[in-house]
Amino acid sequence: MRCGIIGLPQVGKTSLFTILTRTHVEAKGGQREAHLGIAKVPDDRLERLTALYKPKKQIHATVEYADVAAIGQEALKESAYAEGLRKVDAFCHVLRAFEDDAIPHVGKSPQQDADKVEFDLIVDDLGTAERRLERLEKDLKKMKTSELEREKELFLRLKAHLETEKPLRVMELSADDRKRLRGFGLLSLKPILYVLNIAEAEDLGKALAEAPEKYGLSAFEGGKSTGVAAICGKVEADLAEMSDEDAAEFLSGYGLTESGLVRVIRKTYELLGLMSFFTVGEDECRAWTVPIGVRAVEAAGAIHTDLEKHFIRAETIHWDELLAAGSEAAARGKGTLRLEGKEYIVKDGDVLNIRHSG
């Protein structure tokens, strides 16, 4: 899964990308090519399972981030730029909420900047809908089919909705509708996480917590395919250069227990509709990424296609139950380690051991 980091110029999005992925980017004026990097998904559950098993390797779940050039209607007219945005699964929109006379600010307020970019995404989607309707009209003149008629009806609904200047992510769409739209990469349909980049403050913990309401974005917290997080880019840049011990002490000085980046990564993971299950052992403790609501047989396929093909049962226990038992053998004796079949819906935090015939 890939999340595109977008925003107006000079908001701190490339700095966020660099800190998230530990990937250093060489700035080049006017460059449109996206930079890609991987961020580990912080997970205390995996840390605690690793402490229990003491494996040779620990492998976190990951999210891929793409840092793209500054967004705007002119940029969206460039086909390569727009296509790059269509390939991501969600957006992380960085909003400038700090003052610095040394750094020019082309935007206005975080709320207005969010509205401007949202409007640009809506306009782009409206153009896509209009072009598709023109094509469908031509195709229907050649041959009328129920499939083309249904697609036309769907795009007429999309067009009417977009003309109200509302993003498609808030529109009621069926699973069948979403399946039909999958190949179009509609921009305002993608989930979006607003990231407020605030100034350093003495009581930073309080400032971060109050930022969504202060800057008029609290309505997006827990909204439909939306979320809000706040960071202080200056503090995060300092943290990125510290050891874990020094970072923890530094954060405690601000009354914080975790960095803003941890929240950004976690919220991105949630926004993409993802969760983790674990496999554990002396060789490796690992978090596996799967969609929420996945069946046990599909989770087995995330590990290896052969496990899905030859699936028999999944030995299953929730991570906290395993820690409470102290070992799989003890959990088996208590009856908390159980066998589940193909149709079992895997829960976030399940520990699985796949039994197979391969």
Image (tube, helix red, strand yellow):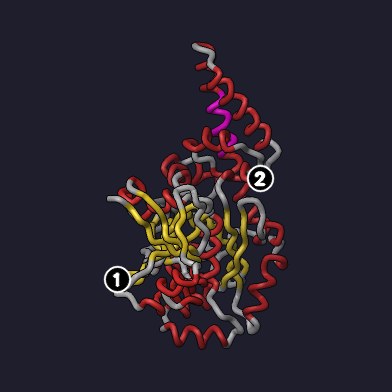
In the image, 63: left or right of 267?
left
Q: What element carries label 1?
A: loop
Q: The magenta stretch spans which residues?
A: 125-133
> Closest to the observer: 270 or 107?
270
Q: Which mark is residue 170?
A: 2
In the image, 57: left or right of 11?
left
Amino acid on which the number 2 mark rests in the picture:
Val
Rendering coords of residue 199 (x, y %) = 60, 74
> Callout 1: few (<14), some (14-19), or many (20+) C-alpha neighbours within 10 Å?
few
Q: Mark 1 = which residue? A: 283
> Callout 2: few (<14), some (14-19), or many (20+) C-alpha neighbours within 10 Å?
some
Q: Which of marks 2 and 1 is in front?
A: 1
Q: Verify CB contact (< 8 Å) between mark 2 and mark 1.
A: no
Rendering coords of residue 209 (x, y %) = 66, 72
Mark 2–mark 1 distance (CA, rounded to whole Å): 45 Å
Vertical side of 131 occupied by 204: above or below: below
Check the image and name the residue furthest to the top: 142
Amino acid on which the number 1 mark rests in the picture:
Asp
